[in-house]
């Protein structure tokens, strides 16, 4: 937050530090929304250019959440170009949000199989449920930060996470039942 304030006051070094700190996080998150690496990289660069040019005095509670949300909507706007105007939620449903197996690389074969079943279960979730699991578990954002990124209120974020976990549990129980039936 100190770098953010210094950047808002015109400190170019603070801006550079913000870019270096958040660029990998933005790439990781953005790649879940947009598989086109070139478009993603251009969007992140555009985001930082716009930040430098605007330096608005709008209050920011979490720099990380603010940047993630800004990138998300920048990618959605680019996705919508050339398509009929849809509400943001419809665009979100059209875009994929994938959690890759890279998040679960492990050393032993048995654990790898369990992790693969978990990923397969997550990828069966609707896009918004996958996104909230990613933000909460992998990015370790608070519900307030998730609310900002996903443009939903705090209680909706909590409810969506609960719903995602319930659905995930049902899918995993189904996988376990199938595995048990095949093995036995």
Image (cartoon, rainbow, N blue to C red):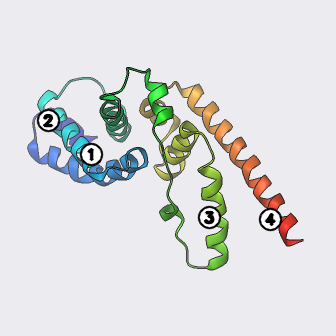
Counting residues from the start of the chain, the first of labels 2 and 4 encountered is 2
Image quarter hosting the C terminus: bottom right
The residue singled out by tag 1 in the image is: 39
Residue in the image at 15% along x and 38% along y: 49
92 sits left or right of 27 in the view = right
Q: Are marks 2 and 4 in contact (CB under 8 Å)?
A: no
Image quarter hosting the N terminus: top left
The label shown at residue 22 is none
The residue singled out by tag 4 in the image is: 179
The label shown at residue 116 is 3
**Looking at the image, which is closer to me, 74 or 148?**
74
52 sits left or right of 80 in the view = left
The residue singled out by tag 2 in the image is: 52
Q: Residues within 10 Å of mark 3 (few under 14, many from 20)?
A: some
| Secondary structure of residue under mark 1 | helix
Q: Nearer the viewer, mark 1 or mark 3?
A: 1
Q: Residues within 10 Å of mark 1 (few under 14, many from 20)?
A: some
Q: Position of residue 137 (x, y in %)?
A: 54, 50
Counting residues from the start of the chain, the first of labels 1 and 4 encountered is 1
* Quarter of the rendering containing residue 163: top right
In this view, 114 is above or below 126: below
Counting residues from the start of the chain, the first of labels 1 and 3 encountered is 1
| Secondary structure of residue under mark 2 | helix
Q: Position of residue 46 (x, y in %)?
A: 19, 39
Q: Are marks 3 and 2 in contact (CB under 8 Å)?
A: no
The answer to whether residue 50 of the structure is visible from this angle is yes
Counting residues from the start of the chain, the first of labels 4 and 3 encountered is 3
Q: Nearer the viewer, mark 3 or mark 2?
A: 3
51 sits left or right of 74 in the view = left
Task: Calculate the distance from the C-alpha at mark 1 to the C-alpha at mark 2.
Answer: 20 Å
């Amino acid at each position: 937050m100190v770098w953010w304030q210094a950047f808002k006051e015109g400190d170019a070094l603070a801006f550079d530090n913000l870019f270096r700190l958040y660029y990998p996080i933005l790439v990781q998150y953005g790649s879940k929304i947009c598989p086109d690496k070139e478009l993603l990289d251009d969007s992140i660069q555009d985001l930082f250019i716009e930040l430098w040019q605007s330096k608005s005095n709008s209050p920011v509670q979490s720099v990380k959440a603010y940047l993630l949300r800004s990138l998300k909507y920048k990618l959605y706007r680019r996705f919508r170009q050339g398509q009929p105007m849809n509400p943001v939620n419809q665009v979100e449903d059209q875009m994929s949000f994938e959690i890759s197996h890279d998040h679960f690389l492990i050393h032993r074969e048995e654990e790898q199989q369990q992790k693969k079943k978990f990923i397969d279960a997550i990828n069966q979730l609707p896009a918004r449920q996958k996104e909230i699991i990613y933000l909460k578990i992998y990015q370790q954002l608070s519900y307030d930060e998730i609310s900002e990124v996903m443009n939903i209120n705090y209680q909706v974020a909590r409810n969506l996470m609960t719903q995602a976990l319930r659905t995930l549990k049902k899918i995993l129980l189904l996988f376990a039942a199938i595995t048990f039936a095949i093995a036995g």
